[in-house]
Image (cartoon, rainbow, N blue to C red):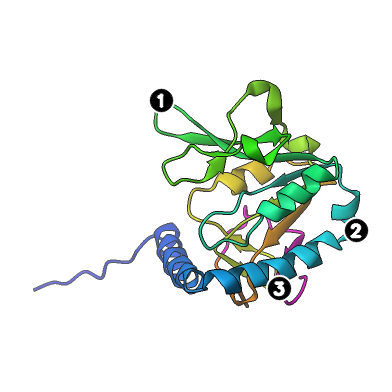
Amino acid sequence: MNCTLFILPTERKLGIIKSEIRKQYLGLRDNLDRCELLNRSESIYCRLMAVQAVIEARTIMCFVSFGSEVHTHGLIRSWLSQGKRVSVPCLEKHKDGNSRMHAVQIRDFSQLKARGSFGILEPLLAESDIVSPQEHDVIIVPGSVFDENRNRMGYGGGFYDRYLTGTSDRCLNIGLCFDFQVIAHIPHENHDIPLDLIVTEKRII
């Protein structure tokens, strides 16, 4: 009987490895109790707000936290109260089943409602409120796992990877995560764009 060794294509291997790493660290994050999550998020909030580029930024895009992500609701409210131009992600769903992420400006946190299938807070998608990638001074990015070289692994949709390719050179891309989500190395490809900063409750990378 002849046996042929089946070797997975490199791209598929990488996808499987990423999926396993993502599952492991999202599991760790989901195990945080609410009090600990909020306390760690508060420490991240304080570190981020002390970054000079964030202090000086006029236009900021920030993810709206969901589930066990670093809590960002207070950040968004604070920037709005400071008079900054704040936008948040909003998915535009197409008839072919694909989706595109836009940054939509909000003027009050009450504009955010649970509109998607996962209950993530989003504003209404109004064309007049869309902020182009080139306009941002700072973008605050979520993720499942990060590494010491500021590489990021998202949730598998690729929305931020595509969006960040359109930003200007002056834009500072900042990842927020808990410190245990930062590992020595995560698999990445040549087209992946590293972040400028990663802020955790213990350090800034």
Note whether residue 9 is visible: yes
Report if residue 200 lies within the magenta region.
Answer: yes
**Residue depicted at x 53% and y 63%:** 68
Could you say where residue 92 lies in the image, as x and y percent from the top left?
52, 31
Along the line of sight, which residue is nearer the eye, 168 or 197?
197
Question: In this rendering, which labeled residue sits more in front, label 2 or label 1?
Answer: 2
Of mark 2 and mark 1, the one earlier in the sequence is 2
Please give the range of residues in magenta.
Answer: 188-205
Residue pictured at 55% horizontal, 43% vertical: 121
Residue 87 horizontal/vertical position (percent): 71, 39
Amino acid type, residue under disc 2 in the picture: Gln
Which secondary structure type mostly characterizes the magenta part of the structure?
A: loop
Which residue in the rendered view is the most extreme toward the left?
A: 1
Q: Which residue is mark 1?
A: 95
Question: Contact (CB < 8 A) between labels 2 and 3?
Answer: no
Crowding at label 2, few (<14), some or many (≥20) Cα neighbours within 10 Å? few
The part of the image, by quadrant, that contains residue 90 is top right
Residue 165 coordinates in the image, percent (x, y): 68, 43
